[in-house]
Image (tube, rainbow, N blue to C red):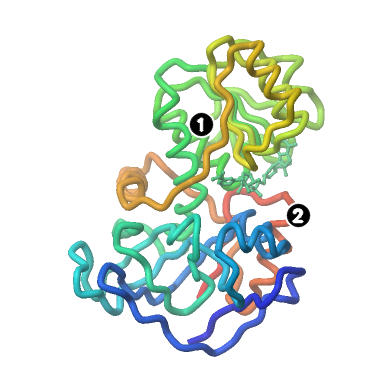
Amino acid sequence: MKAIILENAGGVENLIIKDIAQPTPNDHEVLVKVKAISVNPVDYKVRRNNDVIDKFMGKERPVILGWDIAGTVTAVGNKVSQFKTGDQVFGMVNFPGKGNAYAEYVAAPEHHLAIIPSSISFEVAAASTLAALTALQVLQPRVKKGDRVLIHAGSGGVGHFAIQIAKALGAYVVTTSSAKNKDFVMALGADEHIDYKAQAFEDVLSDMDFVLDMFRGSILFNSLKVTKEGGTVISLPTGDFDEQTIALAKARKINLSWVLVQSSAKDMNTLAQMLQEGSLKPHVSKLIPFAKMDQAHLELESGRTVGKIVVSV
Ligand SMILES: NC(=O)c1ccc[n+]([C@@H]2O[C@H](COP(=O)([O-])OP(=O)(O)OC[C@H]3O[C@@H](n4cnc5c(N)ncnc54)[C@H](OP(=O)(O)O)[C@@H]3O)[C@@H](O)[C@H]2O)c1
């Protein structure tokens, strides 16, 4: 089968297509013939840095990047009970860990997958994995009806799911993006938009119950200022907050933490149900062929992605 191999951290030229042996599923895994893969900022963060590869995937090289797949089950392990050959499945495989998703076939634990609803394409299903799971796992336990919620970068992968999930939970949603994406985020259900290039959100917002931060630095620091006492700020990039940020959170009695998304069939099934009902509408802004994975990484690294970029296999 064809797979995209990374021997060493570096630029997109290090993503090399090779013929390698198909994986064999263990007792609890299914073999998925992959139809679509979605890419996420973590893909290029891992690609660029050997220490980050070690952290997510261990010391062995080469590695196969990627975690988000949609495809058809072609074989099942001896102890698999939920799936059979021919099922169409999607999920975030082994995150954090070795997803091995940039390949024509992926061996995936059955407890990381769900059945794709009949009305949903492989491309849309692949889009509704890591970014959607992140939004769900962060918001569902923390946001309640009537909360004032700020979602930064509402036009991006996580943000565009987070707006929809926060609205489904009954929150009042404010979101940031540049002006060109205002119509997109309002159509997703946001109640208010702030163009971060024209207006500082900390000058116009206060009393937020919950903030989802995608950036750290001054955006995280100012998010703490607009959150009410006892409120919550979740920051996605990393959990190594600087002393000034920790001190402000403490002084303002704000629950500040980092959350790392985890593979989960239970949560994938929640997303499948939302897709089927139509309460979650993923946006695939670019579909890129497998052979152009380098282009998918470069697009993503521009920081301008609207919704999701999906790679077709
Ligand atoms: N901890 C976890 O488990 C976890 C999970 C998922 C993601 N993450 C992290 O979360 C971050 C976001 O991920 P993502 O997939 O949503 O990224 P993304 O899709 O690449 O985000 C792109 C969006 O960010 C917007 N943007 C850029 N600068 C902005 C700013 N200053 N203010 C507001 N919006 C801005 C852009 O809109 P404009 O073009 O309009 O500026 C664009 O639509 C990444 O660092 C990722 O690694 C962490």
Mark 1 CB lies closer than 8 A to ligand 1: no
Relative side of 304 to 137, left or right: right
The mark closer to the camera, 1 or 2, is: 2
Percent from the top left, x then y, of residue 20?
51, 88
Q: Which is nearer the N-term, disc 1 or disc 2?
A: 1
- 250 or 223, which is in the foreground? 250
State which image quarter holds ligand 1.
Answer: top right
Percent from the top left, x then y, of residue 127?
49, 56
Q: CA distance from mark 1 to mark 2?
A: 26 Å
Number of residues whose C-alpha sits closer than 10 Å to that of mark 1, classed few (under 14), some (14–19) or many (20 or more)? some
- 235 or 61, which is in the foreground? 61
Q: Residue furthest front?
A: 59
Q: Which residue is mark 1?
A: 189
Relative height, residue 308 to residue 149 (above, below): below
- Residue at 66%, 78% (x, y): give it: 7
Relative height, residue 213 to residue 264 (above, below): above
Q: Count how many numbered circles sit on residues in the image.
A: 2
- Residue at 31%, 43% (x, y): give it: 277
Q: Which mark is residue 290?
A: none
Q: Which residue is mark 2?
A: 302
- Residue at 71%, 60% (x, y): give it: 299
Mark 2 CB lies closer than 8 A to ligand 1: no
Percent from the top left, x then y, of residue 146?
44, 15
